[in-house]
Image (spheres, rainbow, N blue to C red):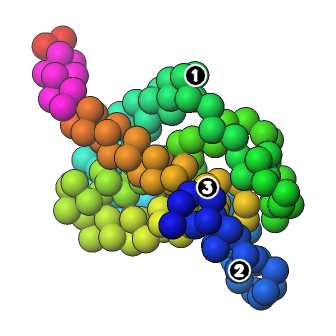
Amino acid sequence: MDNIAAFLFIFDLAGKSQILDNLMIFAAKYLIYFALVFAFAMAIKMGIREKKAILLSIFGLGICLLLVMLIRLFYIEPRPFVTLDIKPLIYHSADPAFPSIHTSIMSVIAFAFIYYKSKLGPLLLALALLVGSSRVYVGVHYPLDIIGGFLVAWLAIYISWAIKGKVVKYLRSY
């Protein structure tokens, strides 16, 4: 199944259930904010693993956003509503779609918590999957945009982990 066929398979589910449409619209637009607040609040209440995960997330988010901007400078993938005759369920500007920023951000946090073996990791990963799939469902991303978001997030966490020790060592020298 190619990217467009996979998109149409998922997008064709829209409009069949008002409850599902509302859930996916909420997930596509707002879940990222609730999940970020939840992750940071739980990290404060929980143990050292979660606090380390938050620090890795902060490094990772910066690197992730930089990677997304660089990719979008050189690779411009139009959104489904630009290339196909569809009306998305939510408004979105016609800026480049690849990789999905929403999915990247959610995945960076999930991967950081998973890296530190936090009990929150699987839940945050499930939320990242929900955010990504909801962005396809509402018509603002292709499935490959979501996969790209996961890959960029993984790379951002890997780079963050690799430089984290050097940054901490440098800061301790002062």
Question: Residue at position x 28%, y 34% from top?
Answer: 160
Q: Which residue is mark 3?
A: 142
Q: Which residue is mark 2?
A: 13
**Crowding at mark 3 (Cα within 10 Å: few <14, some 14-19, many 20+):** many
Q: Which residue is mark 1?
A: 73
Taking the image as shown, residue 33 lies to the left or right of residue 123, namely right
Residue 88 in the image: state x and y as whole percent.
81, 60
Task: Give the prevailing secondary structure in the magenta stretch.
Answer: helix
Taking the image as shown, residue 3 lies to the left or right of residue 117, namely right
Q: Find residue 42 and report its image quarter.
A: bottom left
Residue extending farthest to the front is 1
Taking the image as shown, residue 52 lies to the left or right of residue 166, namely right
Say if the magenta span includes residue 41. no
Q: CA distance from mark 3 to mark 1?
A: 19 Å
Residues in magenta?
A: 162-171
Q: CA distance from mark 1 to mark 2?
A: 32 Å
